[in-house]
Image: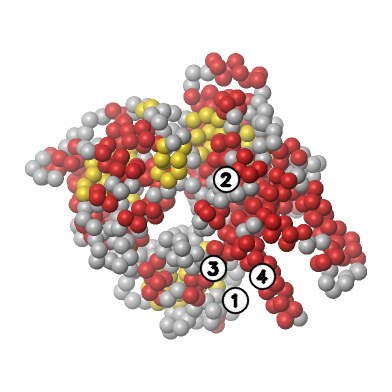
Amino acid sequence: MVKRAINLRNRIVADEYGVQLHNSIEYTARKLSEINAETVNERGLTNVLWARYLSPSIDGFAKKLQALTPIEQAYYYSLYNFITKEQYTTKSGDTDYEGGRMGTASLWLSSLAEKCEAGEILYDLGITENRAADEHKAHVVLSRTGSVSFSEDTPEALPNFRAGDAIVLYERNEDIGNVTNKMVFKGNIEAITENDIKIRLRAPQRNPAVLPADSLYAVEHDTSDITFRAMFLGLSAFVSANQERRDLLLGQRPPEFDTAFDSQITASEDDFTWITLKAQAAKDYFLLVGPPGTGKTSRALKQMAETFHQDERKQILFLAYTNRATDEICKALSSICSQPDYIRIGSELPCDPAYREHLIENVLADCANRKEAQERIAHCLIFVGTAASISNKPELFRLKHFDVAIVDEATQILEPQLLGILCARNEDGRNAVGKFILIGDHKQLPAVVLQSSLQSEIHDEALRAIGLTNLKDSLFERLYRNLGNDEADRAYDQLRKQGRMHPAVAAFPNKVFYGGTLESLNLPHQTEELVLSPLLKDDEDGRIMMQRVAFLPSSPDISAASGKINRSEAVIVARLAKKIFIQYGSAFNAKRTLGIITPYRNQIALIKREITRLNIAKLNHILVDTVERFQGSERDVIIYSFCINHVWQLEFLSNTIEEDGVLIDRKLNVALTRARKQLFMTGVPELLRTNPVYAALLNAVE
C-alpha cells in the first residue's frame, strides 16, 4: 500500500513537472485529454461507488472541457499552465529571481547563514509559556535564550516575521536540526515583540513530551497550497460557468448598462455620487481607478455600500486582496450611519480585533443547529473577506446570491484568483454574483508573481486579441485595456481629486504617471506654509526642513558583496530623522509623522541601527520597511533611501509598465505618494540617472 501511494505521488509530481516545464497549451491539452473514466480506472473497479459517483464525475469533467469553444480552451489551458508553474516555483524556488529564492525547499536547502541573511529564521528559542494542550487557542510563547533580541540591529540579523504569518516550529538543539529530521508543528504568529514570540498552534498537543521545556527551538516561514487550490477550483468553476458569463469575461460580448441612470449621472455634481451612479447603471461590471489619496475605500467604496444597502433586497459581497484592506472595508462599513450588519469570512489572527465579532465563526457560535446557521447566513445581506478566503468557501454560493461584488485592491488580484467567485453558480443555475465592481490602480504595485514575465507571457493570438497578453496582469488590467471607446465612458472612471499629498509632493507623480489629471482638494495640510522650528534656525542643515521635496546625494557602497546596504545613505536618513523629530517637537507621532522606505532588509537594519544611535526613543518606533509594506498607508514625511550601489540593482528597484507611450514605474509611484507634507530622497545620482524615469525625477527635483 505504501509503495502504491508513493508511486502514485511520484506520477502526479511527474505530470505537474511536465506541465510547468513545457508551459505549452498543446502539451497540457494532450495531458488533460487522457483524463477519462477508462484511463483512470487502472484497478478495474466496478462497485457502486465507482459506477454511480466517481466515473460520472470524471467523464463529466472531460465532456465539459471538450465542449468549450477554442478560445475558452486556450484560456483554460493557459491558466492551468500558469497556476502549475507558479505552484512549482513557490515550492522549488527560482534562482533567477532577485536574491535567488528557493521557495519551500529553502527550509532544507538554505544554510543557517543564508536564512539569517534573508531574515527567514528565528532560532535558539526557549519556551517560556506552554499552553499547547489547551483545547481552544492552543499556543506557546518563546523567547531568545541569548542576549540578542528579535530586533537586533545588525544588517545580517533583522527577522522577517510579522503577526499573522504562517510558520513551522521545531526543535533545534544542534546545527543539523531542521524540518526534515525533527517533528514539525504548524501554526501562526499571534504576537511578536523584541524579545518574545507567541505562536498559535493549529492543533492542540496533549502530550507534553513533544515540546520539551529544556529544548531549544527554531521558527521558519510556512507555505500553503490553499491559494493554488482556490485557483484550480476557479478553473473548474469557469468550465461549469454560464455561457453568458464566460462570454463576458473573454470579451465575446460587451458589458451592458441601464440607460435609465443617464440623466442622473449627467446632473450629478459630486464626484462620488457620479461614480456611484455609474456603478449602479452597470449591469455586468464597472472599473474604478483610484490613484493615491483619492479616497477609493474611505469615500467611493463607502458610498457604494451605502447606496446599494438602501435597497433592502440587495445582497453585497466585498472583497480585497489583503487582510489589511479587508479591515479598511470593515472600517468603512462601521462608519455608515445605518450601521449595516455584515459577516466576515476569514481567520481570527489576521483580522483587526475591532472587527472579530463579525467573523462567521463568532456570528454562528450560538446557533443551535444547521438550520439556524443557514437562516442567519441567509438574512445577512453583506459579506466581507479576502479573495482567497471567499474562494475557498464555494459552499457560500450555494446558499447565497449576491447582486453585486465590490472588489478593492483589484489590480493586486490575479485573474484565476477571482474566477471561482465570478463564475460561481447558485443551485438554481444563476450566476452567484450578479455584477462586479473592480476598484484599483494599475499604476501602483501589481499582483505578486514569482515566475518571470517571459514564463507567464501569452502567445495565443486569440487570447492576445482580447487583451490577455501576460498572466501576471490582473483581470482589472485586461478589462481596462480591452474597453472599446463606446464602453469606456460607461464601464470605467477615475477619481481625480486627491486629499493626501501637498501639490509640490504630488507634482512629479501627477505629471508623469497620471498625465496631470489629479487635482488637490486644498485641505489645510495641502495649503499651509512650512514654518521652521526655532530650534533649527541656527542649524546649517535646518533649512532643508523648509523644502517640500528634496534629494540628498549619497556615495556608492561597494564594501558589501550583496550591494544591499549603503552606509552613507543610512547616515543621511538618520540625520534627516533627527531634524524631523526636532521640527515636529511634541507633535511628533511615530505612527503618523515619519516613515522610511528602502528596498532591502539589510538596509532597513542598518538604518534602524543608525537611528538607535541617536538615543531618541520615539524614533525607534517609526516604520522602516520596503515599499510593498507601505502601499495603502501614508505619513506626514517620507524618507526614501534608494540603496543602489550598482546599475544592475535598478531592475529590482523598478517595476515599469508602458501606457500610451509613457513609462510608469509602479514601485516609484507608490513610494513617492505615501507622503502628505514632505518627501526626502537619498541615492547615488550617477546610477539613478541611467534609468529614464529616475533621471526625470532628479531633473524635476533639481
Considering only vertical position in the picture, is 41 above or below 350? below
Query: Does label 2 or label 3 sit earlier along the sequence?
Result: 3
Q: Is residue 192 left or right of residue 606?
A: right
Q: Which x, y percent locates residue 261?
A: 62, 20
How far is the residue under mark 1 from the one under mark 3?
34 Å
Number of the label disc, if any, that sits on residue 601: none
* Residue 434 seen by the camera: no
Q: In the rendered structure, which amino acid carries the disc numbered 1? A: Arg
How far is the residue under mark 1 from the one under mark 4?
38 Å
Per the image, the residue denoted by label 1 is 206
Mark 2 burial class by Cα count in 10 Å: few <14, some 14-19, many 20+: some
Mark 4 burial class by Cα count in 10 Å: few <14, some 14-19, many 20+: few
* Residue 265 seen by the camera: yes
Per the image, the residue denoted by label 4 is 14
Q: In the rendered structure, which amino acid carries the disc numbered 4? A: Ala
Query: Does label 1 or label 4 sit earlier along the sequence?
Result: 4
